[in-house]
Amino acid sequence: MTKVIALYNGVFNAISGLAGDWLLPSLARFTFAATLLIYYWNSAQTKLGEGIFGLFHPSLGGYAQIFPKAMEAASYNTDALTWFHWAVAVAGTAAEFILPLLIAIGLLTRLAALGMIGFVALQSLTDLYGHGGINQPDTLGAWFDRVPDSTILDQRLFWLTILVVLIIKGASVFSVDHLLGRKAPA
């Protein structure tokens, strides 16, 4: 039995040595880019207003996505909202474009991943309480229930796991962070 354990440890220690510190963060960034980059960019585009400065004039749909109850209370009249609503809509839309891009190219990766965790938390709370997902068991889901596809608890756990890997491990050698770090003075 000792020989089997030694063989097992030898094989997997060799694999770990080959993977080094580059494989896990590279896979995490690839997975994020392959599954969530375009998701967030498409979501951000639905919040843009008309014209080249559309970011600073959020669409009606953008306000309705971010502040569903406030928009309903204002009879979907954006003029009835405050500067706070405007600032959150602009910042949230910008974050949906910028943070995923930073993660994909590996620039300020740890900070961007931390920002995305905050974004996902706010997105999830809005989905649950603003859009009523808390009252829809299939949307909320449950862990350890044999059904792995609920929007909030199941999906978002995978997203957060990827982001936590990036916070802990960084972006890997295949990143702008690594290139800048090599050129930075000691």
Image (cartoon, rainbow, N blue to C red):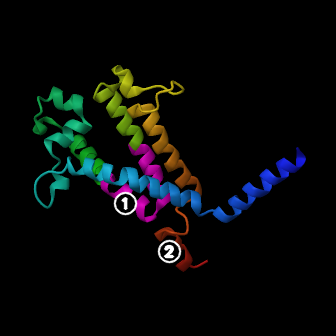
User: Label 1 amino acid?
Assistant: Leu
For the question of whether residue 20 can be seen, the reply is no
Which residue position holds label 2? Answer: 180
Q: Is 100 a magenta residue?
A: yes
What secondary structure is found at the residue carrying circle 2? helix
Give the extent of the magenta segment.
95-119
Element at label 1: helix
Q: Percent position (x, y) of residue 32?
A: 43, 53
Left or right relative to 148: residue 36? left
Name the residue located 32 percent from the left edge and 33 percent from the top edge: 126
What is the three-letter code of the residue carrying label 2? Answer: Leu
Q: Main secondary structure of the magenta part?
A: helix
Look at mark 1 in the image and give the residue it sits on.
Answer: 101
Vertical side of 44 occupied by 76: above or below = above
Q: Nearer the viewer, mark 1 or mark 2?
A: 1
Question: Which residue is at a point 46% across and 53% down the rendered structure image?
Answer: 113
* Image coordinates for residue 47, horizontal then vertical, percent: 20, 47
Question: Disc 1, disc 2: CB below 8 Å?
Answer: no
| Residue drawn at x 56%, y 77% as measured from the top left | 182
- Residue 87: image tag: none
Mark 1 vs 2, N-terminal side:
1
Mark 1 Cα-neighbour bin, 10 Å: few <14, some 14–19, many ≥20:
some
In-front residue for pair 147/128: 147
